[in-house]
């Protein structure tokens, strides 16, 4: 499980995550397995919370479709619509994952954060795209992180320090979050 937060403040945008990697009930030390939870993907900072296999699938999808971009809500939605089709056409081990028999929609059974120079976007398991103005969090520790983000956002702190405090809150209270805090800045994008 994970905690990933995104914060935009005073013209600066950062994404932060814990470094814990788990396989079922086994937790792997960061020194033994360095897996970046935040990547630069299709022109944006990108992270997911949920099934780790999505990292491999999405990397393959972007490598095979270099024209893809994550510039705004519409292009993010189109990115995931194309991914959904690709999941069913190319990766035969993927199913619709929807547990709610009342829902007419499939479910990715994971959530995603995208940050670019235009905004902060959360993509839900049903592929809905929501834009946030200040901050958001996904993953098993997101309730704790969102509480911390709400509590400290208006203080005289920069985006990186706010994000770091939110990840620290999730690590402190959620047993599925842990390790070091990794921070990426939107200014790293070319």
Image: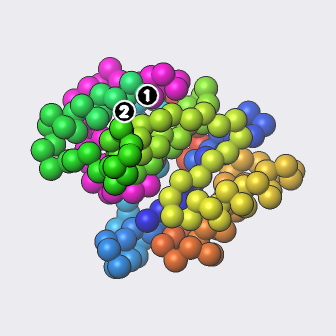
Q: What is the span of residues highlighted in magenta in the rendered image?
A: 47-76
Q: Residue furthest front?
A: 102
The chosen color scheme is rainbow
Say the numbered circle drawn on residue 80: 2
Q: Quadrant of residue 161?
A: bottom right
Image quarter where the N terminus lies is bottom left
Left or right position of 168 against 158: left
Q: Position of residue 22 (x, y in %)?
A: 37, 71
Left or right position of 76 against 118: left
At 48% from the left and 22% from the top, the residue drawn is 74
- Between the residue at mark 1 and the residue at mark 2, the CA separation in whole angstroms equals 5 Å
Is residue 182 at all visible to an observer of this figure?
A: no
Q: Are marks 1 and 2 in contact (CB under 8 Å)?
A: yes
> 14 or 130, which is in the foreground?
130
Mark 1 sits on what residue?
Answer: 77
Asked if the stretch drawn in magenta spans residue 64, the answer is: yes
Is residue 67 at all visible to an observer of this figure?
A: yes
Q: Position of residue 51 (x, y in %)?
A: 33, 57
Exactly how many numbered labels are in the figure?
2
Asked if the stretch drawn in magenta spans residue 42, the answer is: no
User: For the residue labelled by badge 2, is the local secondary structure a helix, a strand or a loop?
Assistant: helix
Say the numbered circle drawn on residue 107: none
Q: Position of residue 162 (x, y in %)?
A: 72, 54
Q: Quadrant of residue 133?
A: top right
Residue density around tag 1, few if under 14, some if 14–19, many if 20 or more, within 10 Å: some
Would you place residue 172 above or below residue 110 in this image? below
> 95 or 105, which is in the foreground?
105
Q: Position of residue 89 (x, y in %)?
A: 15, 34
At 72% from the left and 55% from the top, the residue drawn is 149
User: For the residue labelled by badge 1, is the local secondary structure a helix, a strand or a loop?
Assistant: helix
Would you place residue 143 above or below residue 24 in this image? above
């Amino acid at each position: 499980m994970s905690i990933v937060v995104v914060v935009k403040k005073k013209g600066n945008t950062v994404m932060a995550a814990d470094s814990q990697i788990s396989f079922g009930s086994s937790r792997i030390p960061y020194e033994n397995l360095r897996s970046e939870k935040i990547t630069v993907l299709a022109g944006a900072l990108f992270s997911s919370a949920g099934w780790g296999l999505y990292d491999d699938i999405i990397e393959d999808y972007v490598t095979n479709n270099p024209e893809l971009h994550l510039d705004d809500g519409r292009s993010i939605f189109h990115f995931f619509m194309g991914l959904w089709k690709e999941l069913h056409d190319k990766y035969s081990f993927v199913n619709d994952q929807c547990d709610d028999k009342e829902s007419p929609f499939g479910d990715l059974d994971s959530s995603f954060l995208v940050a670019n120079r235009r905004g902060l976007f959360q993509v839900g398991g049903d592929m809905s795209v929501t834009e946030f103005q200040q901050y958001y969090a996904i993953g098993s520790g997101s309730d704790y992180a969102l509480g911390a983000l709400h509590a400290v956002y208006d203080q005289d702190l920069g985006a990186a320090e706010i994000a770091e405090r939110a990840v620290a809150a999730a690590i402190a209270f959620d047993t599925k979050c842990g390790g070091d805090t990794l921070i990426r800045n939107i200014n790293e994008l070319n």
